[in-house]
Amino acid sequence: MVTKIMSWFDERLPITATIERHLTKYPAPINMNIWYLAGFLLIVVLVIQLISGIWLLMSYEPTAEGAFASIQYIMRDVEYGWMIRYMHTTGASAFFALIYLHMFRGMMYGSYQKPRELLWVIGWFTYLLLCMLGFTGYVLPWGQMSFWAAQVIMSLFGSIPFFGEELLTWIRGDYLISGITLNRLFALHVVLLPLALIVVIFVHILALHEVGSNNPDGVDVKKFKDEDGVPLDTKPFFPYDIVHDLYAVGVFLIFFCFIMFFYPDGGGYVIEYVNYEAADNLKTPEHIVPSWYYTPYYAMLRAITFPLFGLSAKFLGFVVMAAGIAIFVALPWLDRSPVKSIRYKGVYSKFFLTLFVISFFVLGYLGSVASTPIRTILAQFFTCTYFAYFLLMPIYSKYEKCNPVPDRVTLS
C-alpha cells in the first residue's frame, strides 16, 4: 500500500528521486571531519530562530512607545516567555559563531575554488543576509544600546557624498530615528529577510549537491568511480553522515542550553547590560558597541581617523568596513594556487591565513572596548593585515611552492 501511494505521488511529483538525490543517496566524501559539522548545525539554529521568532512575534509590539515594554511583558508575564527570548538571543550568537566557522573551513580547504565559485558566492549572500537580520533584530528590543547602535550605523549612510543625507532620511523614514524606523526594521526582520535567507540557503544546498562537497584534501572524489558510477571515496549521506551530525546536534544543544539557562547575557556580549534600559534619545551611553559578531568591522570603522581626497574619515571608515565584508566574495578569483587545501599549500598561504585569523580576533576585541590612541593604531595595523590576506593572495598563492596532492582522499 505504501509503495502504491509513493508511486502515485512520484508520477506527479518526484518526491523519492529528490529525497535520494539530496539526502539518502547523496555521495559525501568519506574523510569529512569536525569542520564540516557547522553547516548542518546552521540549519538546526535556523529552525530554532524561526520557531522562537514566531512565538516572540505573538507578544511583541513594534512601536517606539510599546517595544521595550512588550519585551518586559514577554520576559515577566508570558508563560515561558523568558526562555523563548533567551533561546532567540542565544541562537543569534550561535548563528554567527557557526557561520564564521563554516566560512573559515571553506577558506582553509579551498571550497571556493573551481567548480565551487558560485557556491561560495551564494554562501556569501547568506552571510550578508544574516548580518542584516542580526542588525534589524538587534534594534527591535528598543533598549539604550539598540537605539544608539542604530543611530551610529544608520548615520554612516549620511556620510556618503552628495546624496547621503537624502538617503539617510529615506532609510529612517523620518528626520530622526523614531517609531517609523522601528516599524521598517521590524518588517524587514520578520518578513523580507527571513524569506530571502530561506531561499538563498535552499539554493546554496542545491548548488552544493550539484557540484558535490569538498573534502579536507581538496581532491575531486568524482574522478574514481565503481562499476555503478558511484565515487569510490564517498558514502551515502544517510545513514552514515546523518548519524554523526545528530550526535553533533546533541552535543551542540547541551552547550546551547547551558548558555540559554545559566549564562543568557553572556557576560554582556550576548545581551548588553545597558540594553536593559529603555531607549532614551537624550541620554547617550558611555560606550556604544555593536554585538560581538560585528566588532571586527566596527574596529575597522573606527580605525580610519583621517580624511582623504576631500572625503570624510567617517565615510572612508564606512567604505573600509563594507569592504571588509564584501571582499570575501572575491576569494575564488584571488587565489591562484594550483591546490585547494591548506594541507598542501605552501608556507606563505599558511602564514597569511594564520595572520588573518589573528587579525580578526584582535579587531574583534578592539571593536568591543573604548577607543584610545594606542588601540586606534593597533586597529589600523590589524586592518592592514586583515586585507593583506586577500590583496596579496594573487602573488603569494601563485609563486609559493606547494606539496604534492594525492590522487584520492586520505583518512588521517
Image (spheres, rainbow, N blue to C red):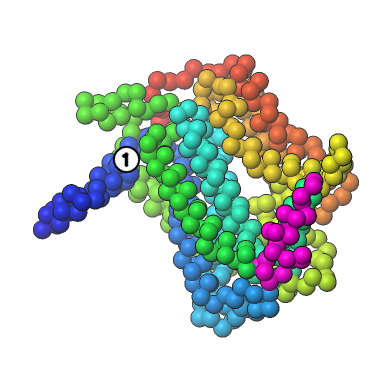
Name the kind of residue labelled 1 in the image.
Tyr
Image x and y of residue 129, in percent = 56, 51
Image x and y of residue 42, in percent = 48, 52
Image x and y of residue 176, in percent = 76, 66
Q: Which residue is mark 1?
A: 26
The stretch in magenta equals 161-182
Number of numbered discs visible in the structure rendering: 1
Mark 1 nearby-residue class (10 Å; few <14, some 14–19, many ≥20): some
Quarter of the rendering occupied by the N terminus = bottom left
In this rendering, position of residue 33 left or right of residue 193: left
Please say if 376 is above or below 170.
above
Image x and y of residue 56, in percent = 53, 72
Tell me which residue sits at (82%, 43%) in the image. Answer: 304
Tell me which residue sits at (78%, 55%) in the image. Answer: 165
In this rendering, position of residue 81 left or right of residue 327: left
Tell me which residue sits at (61%, 73%) in the image. Answer: 62
Q: Does the magenta-highlighted stretch encompass residue 372?
A: no
Front position in the image: 260 or 390:
390
Tell me which residue sits at (61%, 37%) in the image. Answer: 328
Helix, strand or loop at mark 1 = loop
Front position in the image: 201 or 74:
201
Q: Does the magenta-highlighted stretch encompass residue 180?
A: yes
Quarter of the rendering occupied by the C terminus = top left
> Can residue 368 be seen by looking at this rendering?
no
Please say if 290 is above or below 352.
below
Please identify the quarter of the rendering in which residue 332 is found: top right
